[in-house]
Image (cartoon, helix red, strand yellow):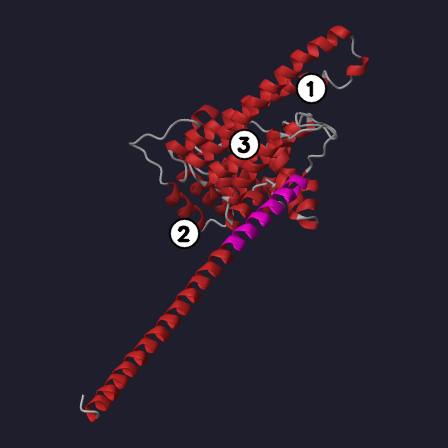
Amino acid sequence: MAQNLLETVTPDNPFDFPGFIQIRFRDSSILNPAEHPANDHDRRSIAHILEGIDRVSVQGILVRTILTHVNDDFSKHAAAVCRTFNTQPAVDTTHALWVQEATSGPAVDAIDTVKGKLERIPPAALRSLLLEGVLLYSDAAAATLAASNSISPALSTALSEIEEAYQSCLKMLQTTRRLVACQCAPEQAKEEFLESCCETKSQITARKEQLHVTIRTIGRAAELTPAWETRRDALRASDKLYWKCKSWNVFLRDGEEGTDEVRSHFIDSIGALAENMGPIERQRYLDEGFNFKILESLEGKMYEALKEVKRAADNLRANLAQRNTKDTKMGEKHMSDVAGIRKAETKRLKRRRVKDRKALEKALGNLGL
């Protein structure tokens, strides 16, 4: 059955997904879609569409669907699926917890909880879960339709580049974590260990250079293919890598001297990605279970303060330019007034000269000269 769901839709038997949604949820007399299972062809066709949607979008649609319909059987089924793939038995993954957080606590807490559980589910199981949601709820079907229409070959390539850069960097960080740990207690180390620490430091330096490359790769993918999906994935990947670096002591420790260029590069890149998100995209980012952790941390506040300083400097430059323009106009008016006075004085002098010349000619005539 699972194999049949992944069969492609042939040109001879195309699938009209918008038409399916309209018939099932708008023009149909079906009051409870759960009581009317879709036929095999429709299920295979929708499963094929879901294969073309990136994992993060699938997860985001599921987060919204589960919390919107948190009291339904679908949400209970999703909680059961999460328990199947739960690797931390001590962590509560019950449906009752989801209901409690969705109805009585801050929305962000419920979103974080559901998102954290869905991240542990394999992509195939996630898409299978979303398939059931699409067949049950019009909002899930509409969101899936929108996500499927937005994926182009260029966008798919950019998302793959971001994911590959993230996974590669994550593996490198796991090695760097072990290298950094070797320097935690050099006082108790033997001489030969101290000699190896010099090599350790050089390896850490090389890996930090790789971090710079990864940050640039992720940011460039979002820049060259500007879309909601690339900005979302780039921000998500950079945010997760930042906190891995912070918790694994890749950044400079407290009290160590020097400028932490890697952390600064992360903050600048994440800040730029967040700036390119409009208010609607930021809210959508939060609704899908992601938080601007760095921008809410101390570094984020510093970044916002720096942006305020930049804005103040820009405003100052604009005011100075406006003032200079105003001064220039005033100077031009002053010069114009001076020119007018000089022109009037010249005319007055000319009239005076003419009058004096006539008086002189009259006096000379009276003298017979």
Three-letter amino acid code of the residue under disc 1: Val
Q: Position of residue 70 (x, y in %)?
A: 62, 45
Within 10 Å of the Cα at label 1, are there few (<14), some (14-19), or many (20+) other Cα atoms?
some
Query: Helix, strand or loop at disc 2?
Result: loop
Q: Depth-wise, is mark 1 or mark 3 nearer the camera?
A: 1
Three-letter amino acid code of the residue under disc 3: Leu
Residue position for label 3 = 126
- Quadrant location of the C terminus? bottom left
Q: Position of residue 246 (x, y in %)?
A: 67, 30
Q: Are marks 1 and 3 in contact (CB under 8 Å)?
A: no
Total numbered labels placed on residues in the image: 3
The answer to whether residue 37 shows anywhere in this view is: no
Front position in the image: 325 or 154: 325
Residue at 63% x, 39% y is 294
In the rendered image of this protein, does residue 241 appear above or below residue 228?
above
Residue at 63% x, 20% y is 174
- Which callout, 2 or 3, points at the residue further toward the start of the chain? 2
The answer to whether residue 16 shows anywhere in this view is: yes
Spatial CA span between label 2 and label 3: 29 Å
Residue position for label 1 = 180
Query: Helix, strand or loop at disc 3?
Result: helix
Three-letter amino acid code of the residue under disc 2: Asp
- Which callout, 1 or 3, points at the residue further toward the start of the chain? 3
Residue position for label 2 = 27
Q: Position of residue 264 (x, y in %)?
A: 60, 34
